[in-house]
């Protein structure tokens, strides 16, 4: 007998009232006011704080769209994706650990100056416990983007159509969340003529919205910097995230930073970006 699909569905991570300690109160003690009150107050505490803990855990750690810096650091370790770029990884000439002041190679150490290893009274900076380096840390949204890309890599079949579908979703959602500046110049934007109205979020009289999608950046006269398509209303109208600063019929550019992959038909593929990828992401990738 084959099990139904619903029977194989994974249950929710947790359900309402995950710690029903009130069920431990036996019926014969339900009339004992002090004990009943104690148990119910404890149950109320669980209802509020236990649920809140798991809600926050899912939001701040589990969900790669909303995870905070702590959660992203955890995912960085699990998925083996660095959240920083070390630009000068070469070691300097100091000891990584020691109790002597630094001296040039070949020079005997002066044991009287060992305190300088920890920072001396004369302003000498010590603490040569590790090599010095310069590093750039990814922003929160850049890290969310990079980790979701690694997640898609792990769960995807890897076909060209599937990869491009994943990238389209990833880039649009990342632009909306602020991982990339929507005013970044992009290659081959969609150019359409539309009518804007002062203090209105509507753009009307577009020739066609068939090639547009929610999340695309918009630039043009009367369009505030950072505006994106919030919704597509019809074949000729869209709603923007920011109200227009002028009225008129103007030329508008629609486009956002995006990514796609091409099959080279020689056992290799090419990743193409229609914008200049920030240098820190280039280094990580």
Image (cartoon, rainbow, N blue to C red):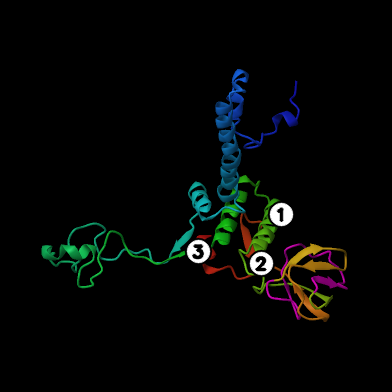
- Counting from the top left corner in percent of width and height, residue 106 is at 15, 66
Residue for point 87% across, 64% down: 234
Where disc 2 sits, the SS reads loop
Q: Residue 283 carries which label?
A: 3
Where disc 3 sits, the SS reads helix
Q: Is residue 29 left or right of residue 241?
A: left
Q: Which of 143 and 22 is in front in this view?
A: 22
**Distance Cα–Cα, label 2 vs label 3:** 18 Å
Give the quarter of the image for residue 118. Answer: bottom left
Does residue 223 show up magenta in the picture? yes
**Mark 2, residue position:** 257
- Counting from the top left corner in percent of width and height, residue 137 is at 48, 63
Of mark 3 and mark 1, the one earlier in the sequence is: 1
The answer to whether residue 261 is seen in the rendering is: no
Give the magenta-colored segment's residue range.
200-226
Q: Residue 165 carries which label?
A: 1
Look at the magenta stretch and give its main secondary structure: loop
**Distance Cα–Cα, label 2 vs label 1:** 15 Å
Of mark 2 and mark 1, the one earlier in the sequence is: 1
């Amino acid at each position: 007998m084959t099990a139904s699909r619903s029977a194989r569905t994974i249950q929710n991570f947790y359900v309402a009232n995950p710690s029903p300690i009130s069920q431990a109160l036996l019926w014969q003690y339900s009339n004992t006011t002090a004990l009943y009150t104690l148990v119910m107050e404890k149950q109320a505490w669980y209802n509020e704080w236990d649920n809140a803990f798991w809600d926050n855990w899912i939001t701040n750690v589990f969900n790669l769209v909303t995870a905070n810096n702590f959660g992203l650091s955890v995912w960085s370790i699990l998925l083996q994706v660095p959240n920083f770029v070390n630009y000068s990884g070469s070691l300097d000439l100091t000891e990584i650990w020691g109790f002597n002041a630094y001296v040039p190679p070949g020079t005997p150490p002066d044991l009287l100056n060992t305190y300088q290893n920890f920072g001396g009274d004369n302003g000498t900076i010590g603490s040569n416990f590790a090599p010095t380096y310069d590093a750039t840390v990814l922003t929160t949204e850049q890290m969310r983007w990079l980790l979701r890309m690694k997640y898609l890599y792990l769960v995807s079949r890897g076909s060209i159509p599937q990869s491009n579908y994943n990238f389209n979703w990833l880039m649009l959602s990342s632009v909306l969340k602020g991982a990339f500046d929507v005013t970044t110049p992009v290659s081959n934007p969609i150019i359409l003529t539309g009518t804007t109205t002062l203090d209105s979020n509507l753009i009307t009289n577009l020739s066609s919205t068939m090639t547009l999608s929610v999340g695309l950046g918009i630039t043009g006269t009367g369009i505030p910097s950072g505006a994106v398509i919030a919704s597509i209303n019809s074949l000729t109208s869209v709603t923007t995230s920011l109200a227009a600063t002028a009225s008129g019929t103007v030329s508008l550019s629609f486009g956002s930073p995006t990514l796609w992959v091409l099959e080279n038909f020689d056992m290799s593929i090419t990743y193409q970006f229609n914008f200049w990828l920030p240098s820190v992401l280039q280094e990580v990738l």
